[in-house]
Amino acid sequence: NAGVTQTPKFQVLKTGQSMTLQCAQDMNHEYMSWYRQDPGMGLRLIHYSVGAGITDQGEVPNGYNVSRSTTEDFPLRLLSAAPSQTSVYFCASSYSTDSTGGGTEAFFGQGTRLTVV
Amino acid sequence: QQPVQSPQAVILREGEDAVINCSSSKALYSVHWYRQKHGEAPVFLMILLKGGEQKGHDKISASFNEKKQQSSLYLTASQLSYSGTYFCGTVVPFFGGATNKLIFGTGTLLAVQP
């Protein structure tokens, strides 16, 4: 069972370039999300999805696009990379809720370390 | 808005206890706790739900005060393996229920020394 898989693990971009960070999960989770992690800032939510075809913005969505065409995949697109987007990016997935109506454990990918020069 | 965690960092010797606090300005549906070791992904520790239900780790305990919108994580008789950064994640109510939209705090760095 692979869990949550992110690719690539490392990436260097030049300012203005575009790229897509890939995230795939094999646990049939409805809920998927993208976070960025910067020193002293914790994990900040970029975008999230509650199921195929449904996405919404998180705390820091500017400069990023997402779409969700399948349950398994949730790619994050940087349209025009900027040095401020240098960060570690984590994808996470979970069931939306459990039988009691409470929250459920989020599983994280191993992260993508992105540097924009 | 991110929940506020305190302290920002704490250094312990093995066997000592620590408390990490998490405070939100919004009404909460649940609180999650995660631990992240350096260079690794965050790993789930526990969930605390409204009404007092707690799900997760058997060696770490936590509390959730719904009225005060606060949660505390209690690490007792700390071990070297407890070292890492601890994050609380808060879930706000959504149409009477909740999604799993987690907003994380800025983290608490815990270092346990021999």
Image (spheres, grey):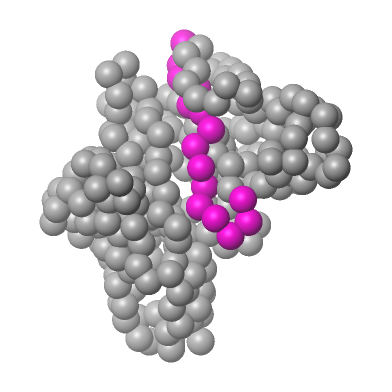
In the image shown, does A81 or B47 lie closer to the viewer?
B47
Q: Quadrant of residue B102?
A: top left
Q: Residue A98 in the image: x percent, y percent?
A: 30, 24
Furthest residue to the top?
B51
Q: Residue at x 61, y 50 (%)?
A: B37
Q: Verify whether residue A72 appears in magenta.
A: no
Residue at image location 67% in from the left, 47% down from the top: B84
Question: How many marks overall?
Answer: 0
Instruction: Indicate yes or no whether the magenta region holds residue B42.
Output: yes
Residue in front for this viewpoint, B37 or B67: B37
- Residue B100, above or below A86: above
Horizontally, residue A102 falls left or right of residue B57, namely left
What is the residue that sits farthest to the front in this orientation? A1
**Residue at position x 47%, y 42% in the image:** B103
> In this picture, which residue range is highlighted in magenta?
B37-51
How far across and down, in percent of the image, does residue A26 sit?
24, 48
Q: Is residue B78 visible?
A: yes
Q: Position of residue B2 (x, y in %)?
A: 54, 44
Instruction: Please indicate whether residue A80 sits to the left or right of residue A50 in the image.
Output: right
Is A62 placed above or below A35 here? below
- Say whether residue A81 is left or right of residue B1: left
Name the residue: 13% across, 56% down: A69
- Residue B54 screen position, x and y as percent: 50, 18
Left or right placement of residue A47 versus residue B28 in this view: left
Compared with residue A116, is residue B102 higher up or lower down, i.e. above or below?
A: above
Q: Can the viewer see residue B89?
A: no
> Relative to residue B53, is residue A11 depicted above or below?
below
